Image (cartoon, rainbow, N blue to C red):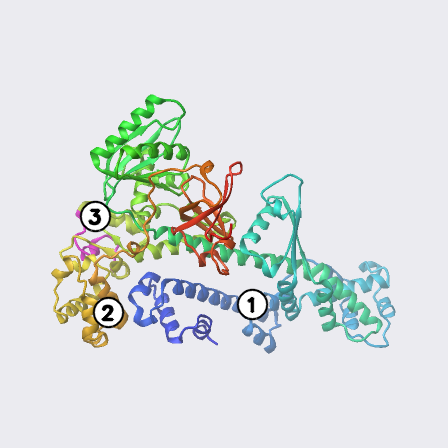
Amino acid sequence: MDHIEQLAAEFGLRPAQVKAAVELLDAGNTIPFIARYRKEMTGSLDDQVLRELAERLEYLRNLDKRREEIEKSLTEQGVLTDELIQQLAEAKTLSELEDLYRPYRPKRRTRATIAKERGLEPLAMWLILQQPRGIPAEEAAKYIDAEKEVPDAEAALAGARDIIAETVSDDAALRKELREMLMREAVLRTAAAKEEDSVYSMYYEYSEPVRNMASHRILAVNRGEREEFLKVTLEAPEEKAVAALKREYVRGTCPASEQIAMACEDAWERLIFPSLEREVRNELTDRANVQAIKVFSQNLHQLLMQPPIKGKVTLGVDPGFRTGCKLAVIDENGKVLDTGVGYFTLPGNEGGKAAAARLIKGFVQKYGVTAIAIGNGTASRESEQFIASLLPEMPGVAYMIVSEAGASVYSASKLAAAEFPDFDVTQRSAVSIARRMQDPLAELVKIDPKAIGVGQYQHDLKQNELTDALDGVVEQCVNQVGVEVSTASAELLSHVAGIGPALAKNIVAYREENGIPTRQALKKVPKLGPRAFEQCAGFLRVADSKNPLDATGVHPESYDAAKKLLEILDYDLKTVKNGGIPDIVLRAKNYGEEKLAGEIGVGLPTLRDMLEELKKPGRDPRDELPKPVLRTDVLDMKDLTPGMELTGTVRNVIDFGAFVDIGVHQDGLVHISRMADRFIRHPSEAVKVGDVVKVWVVSVDEKKKRIALTMVKDRM
């Protein structure tokens, strides 16, 4: 089966879809471009499927490469047989390939190689024959040789058993069988490695079948072991495993068979189990890695796709104690209007608080501030309380805690240094906080996705795989929303399909010097050639272009088709520029979509996408989602009581539940068992980051700062 057929079978797709996708990928097309503008070719495969397809294709190609390397090595050794060629061709995983290569792989000096050096291989072969009347001790006596360090018959038999044990250990079919047995039946056990209390105390005496272990428990155990709080062992069905070895190698009950049985027992204990234990632990870790990256990616996608809070002049507050809280006012488009410092977080200092109150209320009155964004770093609790105390005097103003970590705000503010060279880091951070509220996507792309903190055990994961996955999520979100080329930062532009960091800087530099009045003007940007233009143009918007289609998601390659479409349906470009054509979809259906697609020369998927763009040019998919919660009051943990009903925002989804911001500066945990009135396998089936949910307080532990919540009222 070739790769196309295999991928089609694995993904449940038609071979033609897979073939088209692979050809497009191999030709250098980006995944966002393929997903959005080549739907007719791929059968409308979306970004996620295309990414998974590309990853699996890479694995299969790497498998082929390794298969060729092994075949070359076996050929050079003169041991490649027709049977081996067939076995290598049928191997479906890297583990199976390595098992087949294991007997022929150059080895370090082992007990078996030492025994062979001492001339004991013929004795091992004699034992394997298990002749009914043969006496091992008598045969072994023939190999006694003091110069070769074989002083007696028992030493000769021991060496022969070492050779047999290694032969048994190298049996590819048996290793596969035993590996599968361990994955089905082995139990992972943990115990305390030291007496002191720790976050790993629940694992100080713990066991669980490996087949049942959730990814977060695997990662927790790994970290506890690495930090030397835990001892971890794998308990295997030893008798069953050894029986499988003997079933394959022991024939009869003669004295030689007893030697083979001893060699099988040694092979399991000394060679096979330690090796497979490592493999199983690695496989568990790989499985946990995949799951954790998947959860992290889902959370990041939801966070980036949170609806922007548009049309509000916003005050950003970067909380601090000794140096005060830096303030920045930005207009509806993110332009800085004013800055200041307020000293209102330290106890006492009534004069400073009064001055800060006048400053903030002055900002509200002068600039029409209606939203306040407060960072959740140091002194954010005190800042929230102070801001909330002013709200009765500022009608129409509400606030929101911006949830990313202080380090993320700091890194974003550093990126703003070029834009605000006269601002210090905290001033730039206040601007970043405010912009983060107005447009989460545009601001969060400036931060390393791993620093945003919406995953679990992220530092324990394979960093290259995590980075690739999260970069893919950012790329998907940026291109799904689209980017206004006249105002976008270089960081945002760098995630547009076909544009990297260097080309993004070229676009910004060219824009500052010449402006970019149309999409066609992008072709004048240095090093932005035809290929890059093809990939990026549809995702870049030019709102003030003389061509209204430049402000839509219609790709320039389809402009002629779009104009013909408008003509057939009795519209013109002016109607597009004046806010869109609300009834164009209905009119197209009445005309006949298939007929219309044929007349303008595009497929149905492209036609339907075009109609949606003309219906509402520059539409933002985030606008269709529930808006974030803006608060006008503040609660404290001591105000919470069991049974209290609250509205909160989901901040993080993990394998065992979700953390929800309920406005008390300490997120509460909704365990998976309290998320729905039905069985769910993962919290993501019930909630996603950014969801606004109704919850009830189950319990509050002020000392440990833990809040337990439920989304099902009768599960208290």
What residue is drawn where x is 78% and y is 68%?
Answer: 261
The percent coordinates of residue 212 (x first, y second) are 59, 60
Callout 3: 10 Å neighbours few (<14), some, many (20+)? some
Q: Decide which of tag 2 and tag 3 comes sooner along the chain.
A: 3
The percent coordinates of residue 273 (x first, y second) are 68, 60
As helix, strand or loop, the secondary structure at mark 3 comes to helix
As helix, strand or loop, the secondary structure at mark 2 comes to helix
Which disc number belongs to residue 70? 1
Which disc number belongs to residue 266? none
User: Is the Cβ of the residue at disc 2 closer than 8 Å to that at disc 3?
Assistant: no
Say which of 650 and 148 sits in front: 650
What residue is drawn where x is 85% and y is 62%?
Answer: 154
Tell me: 463 left or right of 135. left
Q: Tell me: residue 44, above or below residue 545.
A: below
Task: Name which quarter of the figure residue 347 lies in.
Answer: top left
Residue type at the position of mark 3: Arg
Say which of 288 and 643 sits in front: 643
The residue labelled by disc 2 is: 607
The residue labelled by disc 3 is: 511
Task: Find out whether residue 53 is within the magenta segment.
Answer: no
Residue type at the position of mark 2: Leu
Task: Find out whether residue 516 is within the magenta segment.
Answer: yes
Residue type at the position of mark 1: Ile
